[in-house]
Image: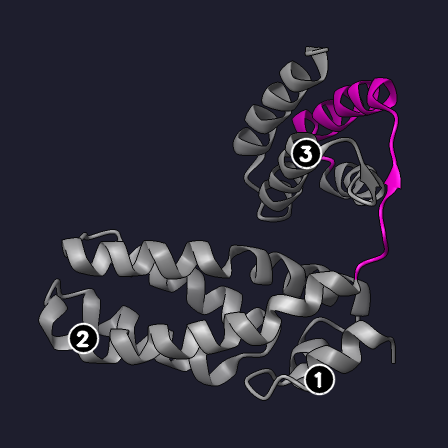
Amino acid sequence: MNSFMEKLTSIPEINVKKALNAMGGMTELYERVVLLTARTMPEHIERLNRQMAEKHPDYVVSVHGVKGALNSIGAYDLGQTAYELEKKSKSGDFESCRELHNTFIQEMIVLARHMQGLQEEQKEKTEGCRAQLSAALKDIAAALHEYDRPGAMDYLSVLCGQSFGTAEDNALEKIKDHAERFEYEEALAWMDKLQNLLKQP
């Protein structure tokens, strides 16, 4: 077991064995899903809090998505709470689920803290070539246009192991995150932004 998985196994809210079995034992895929969830956890918390405060009808959609993310990494107890919130919020009666929401958010914050150090387990990035990145982005865009997600993800996994600059690295992570979630239009939009960044001196 590598150090990443050892640290992950030590997080009490996550049932690594059960989640890994659900993914057919594909450790690399599971680690990528965990890292994606770790990166997006603060965004989920902020969105749910805002939508609850606004009594926004999209809350039920957001909490449904969070439920799936939690279950995919093995945080099944939190996933069950998200399911309860999804059922309660479908009626639009936000007051009835506010207390459960507040408890859920506090538990999400605790999990986010536990997961905070996971990204530090990734290998140190090597310096990348900006010209090669620009060319690779064209190949990735072509793959996504042809719905060749595995091919695009292979490219992105290699590129995300290199450093091209803070803004460029952040854009690459956005592209990878959207591609992992089958959000191809969003991924392509971020590619356009990244190509513009690469044109700057």
Distance between the Cα atoms at labels 3 and 2? 40 Å
- Image point 57% across, 48% down: which residue? 181
For mark 1, give the secondary structure.
helix
Q: In which quarter of the image is residue 23?
A: bottom right
Name which residue type carries label 2: Cys
Q: Which of marks 1 and 3 is nearer the N terminus?
A: 1
Q: In which quarter of the image is residue 19?
A: bottom right
Q: Magenta stretch?
A: 122-148
Q: Using the image as rendered, state which of residue 86 and residue 200 is in the foreground.
A: 200
- Image point 52% across, 70% down: which residue? 112
Q: Mark 1 points at which residue?
A: 9
Residue 50 left/right relative to 128: left
Asked if residue 8 is positioned above or below residue 144 in the image, the reply reads below
Disc 1 crowd, CA 10 A, few/some/many (<14, 14-19, 20+): some
Q: Using the image as rendered, state which of residue 133 and residue 121 is in the foreground.
A: 121
Could you tell me if the residues under marks 3 and 2 are in contact, i.e. CB atoms within 8 Å? no
For mark 2, give the secondary structure.
helix
Q: On residue 147, which mark appears?
A: 3
Q: Earlier in the sequence, mark 2 or mark 1?
A: 1
Q: Quadrant of residue 184?
A: top right
In percent of width and height, residue 41 lies at 49, 61
Q: Mark 2 points at which residue?
A: 97
Q: Earlier in the sequence, mark 3 or mark 2?
A: 2
Can residue 71 be seen in the rendering of this structure? Answer: no
Distance between the Cα atoms at labels 1 and 3? 34 Å
Name which residue type carries label 3: Tyr
In percent of width and height, residue 134 lies at 78, 19
- Image point 68% across, 34% down: which residue? 147
- Image point 73% across, 65% down: which residue? 31
Residue 194 left/right relative to 156: left
